[in-house]
Image (cartoon, helix red, strand yellow):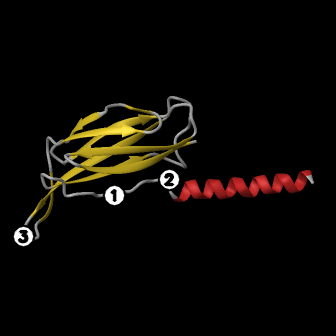
Amino acid sequence: MKRKTNIKRLVLGFLIAGGIFWGCQAQVEDLTGPSSLGNILGIQGLFGGAGIQNDGVSQATIKVEVFTAVSYGAGLIPLEDAIVTLTTTLGTLGAATLTTGASGAATTTLTSGTTVGIAFVTATVDNVTATTSVPII
């Protein structure tokens, strides 16, 4: 009976680890917009492995990008000096407000707390938001 319970725990552990592994690296596929000012927003969580440890010191890099849509099929142009506000459901952000550089990007860090779970980091520019997730394990 004890062996059967251990096997169930092992299988469950592999299933959970596999689910985290497959979703461990966010992509900037969450482009949203255009905003009321014509801006498009993306966010990405950058971390290695299956997530960051719940030790209160491990960090993930949070990258935001802001573009402006150009007419006549020219594509997206990075927007410098866009002000982006950030919030998180778990952990602590290095900065709650970012200003994009010439590349239209800005970064900060997400530091883990001691709670295990998924940190949802939301970026807002103008009237649009984009969200990424970072597992805290």
Towards the viewer: 122 or 61? 122
Per the model, the C-alpha gap separating discs 1 and 3 is: 24 Å
Please identify the quarter of the rendering in which residue 53 is found. Answer: top right
User: Helix, strand, or loop for circle 1?
Assistant: loop
Q: Residue furthest top?
A: 56
Q: Which residue is mark 3?
A: 72
According to the picture, the residue beneath numbered tag 2 turns out to be: 24
Q: Quadrant of the C terminus?
A: top right
SS assignment at label 2: loop
Q: Earlier in the sequence, mark 1 or mark 3?
A: 1
Q: In the picture shown, does residue 22 fall above or below 109? A: below
Image spot of residue 14 (x, y percent) = 68, 56
Give the crowd class for mark 3: few <14, some 14-19, many >=20 residues within 10 Å.
few
- Lower position in the chain sequence, tag 1 or tag 2: 2
* Mark 1 or 2, closer to the camera: 1
Q: Which mark is residue 30?
A: 1
As drawn, 53 above or below 32? above
Q: Residue furthest left?
A: 72
